[in-house]
Amino acid sequence: MKVGILQEGEVMPGVSYAQRYQEMIAEVALADKFGFSTWGTSEQHFSPPRFTVSAPEVLYAAISQHTKRIKFRVMCSVLLKWNHPILVAERLATLHNISNGRAEIGTARSNNLTTLDAFGVTPTETAEQWADSMEVLAKIFESDKLEHDGPVWKIPERTIVPSFDKATHPPVSVAASSIKTHASAGESQIGVMCFENYFGFDYLQECIDAYRKAYATGKPQMPKPNDYMGLYVATAFCAPTREEAARVARDVALGYFRFILDLYVPLSKKGSYEYLDRIRLLEANEGNLDFLMTETPSVLIGSPADFIERLLKLEAMGVDEVLLRIDGVPHEEIMKSIELIGREVIPVVDRDYKVAAE
């Protein structure tokens, strides 16, 4: 079981964006030291203070120069019309080069109506825009000569610089919440990063099973297939005791949960997002941290023993890597949590730990 970290530059009161970015650089450097597998940040717009990274490729480049082993996965590049797939590929290739081959890419179609409205995209358009952008990416990974005539992108023949080696191009994954999207990822033999929307362990298992079943008979969309099954944990925090962890992370856990409810309840009424009807069942537990800590994979708050128990359970379900969102609490607490996970959790759950930590 691999243990990765995801952050979104959440700003505490009195902390500037500049300070938070410098804090993240130090936090990822510490995670690199203690054997975390992957670091990533999402591309978010118009949503402070919880999400402040709108130009993630710049931050990745800076952090790559302060680390040696940890991989950088874009989580996620929103492949809609404001992010041309050529620009996404050029930035990814640049990161791959300056990080000595540590770049990966996760893709997504946005589920944020505030962002979609600002960039002039309707929810019903996102599936087609994402799919056509993926076709362009596949062609760029296959050859430095690109030509494309799709439903969204019309691209005359051009040479892409820098280019990729098709045998070693960065692994590709997609962020997924619905069972349908998990199956689609499996059919295309790309990796998947699951966010189960607090729907519970049974729902997560349905997503995993749909992905694995579809992957077995799928056809690779990219030159290099990727059979990766990851899980996004929306709020994670480790402390010496469960009580201390809950005390420190309570506000960020409940705040993020409230954000998800505010985001997904109206979205569930739109076309192409009907599966989110389930989220209404969670509204009764809006302020119930005990429920979130025990009933959903989207929250992992507790002691090292709690982390080990949960991670081994997820591994048995078929998860390859957890992506822990350790954010939204003071920098000093984040550093302590990262070190505690690195010292007491990763050596137990990651069989490759000794190699990673040399």
Image (cartoon, grey):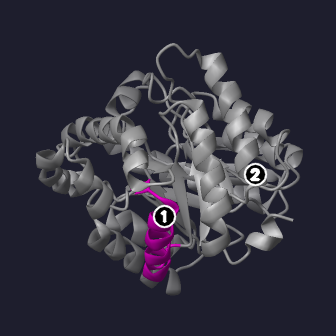
Of tags 2 and 1, which is closer to the observer?
1
* Side (left or right) of 68 relative to 74: right
171 in relation to 149, above or below: below
* Side (left or right) of 3 relative to 37: left
Q: Is residue 149 visible?
A: no
Name the kind of residue labelled 2 in the image.
Asp
Q: For residue 102: magenta? A: no
Tell me which residue sits at (66%, 26%) in the image: 21
Specify the principal SS of the magenta part: helix
Q: Where residue 357 sits in the image (x, y, percent)?
A: 81, 64
Q: In this rendered view, identify the residue nearer to me: 10 or 126.
A: 10
Q: In this rendered view, identify the residue nearer to me: 4 or 305.
A: 305
Label 2: few (<14), some (14–19) or many (≥20) C-alpha neighbours in 10 Å: many
The circle on residue 307 is: 1
Label 1: few (<14), some (14–19) or many (≥20) C-alpha neighbours in 10 Å: many
Indicate the quadrant containing the C terminus: top left, top right, bottom left or bottom right.
Answer: bottom right
Tell me which residue sits at (30%, 39%) in the image: 254
Q: Secondary structure at mark 1?
A: helix
Residue identifier under label 2: 32
Tell me which residue sits at (85%, 47%) in the image: 99
Tell me which residue sits at (87%, 47%) in the image: 97
Q: Where residue 292 sits in the image (x, y, percent)?
A: 28, 54
Q: Where residue 95 sits in the image (x, y, percent)?
A: 79, 43
* Side (left or right) of 41 relative to 301: right
Question: Which quarter of the figure has residue 298?
Answer: bottom left
Q: In this rendered view, identify the residue nearer to me: 93 or 353.
A: 353
Estimate the spatial distance between the alpha carbons at disc 2 and disc 1, rounded to whole Å.
Answer: 19 Å
Magenta span of residues: 300-319
Q: Is residue 244 visible?
A: yes
85 in relation to 198, above or below: above
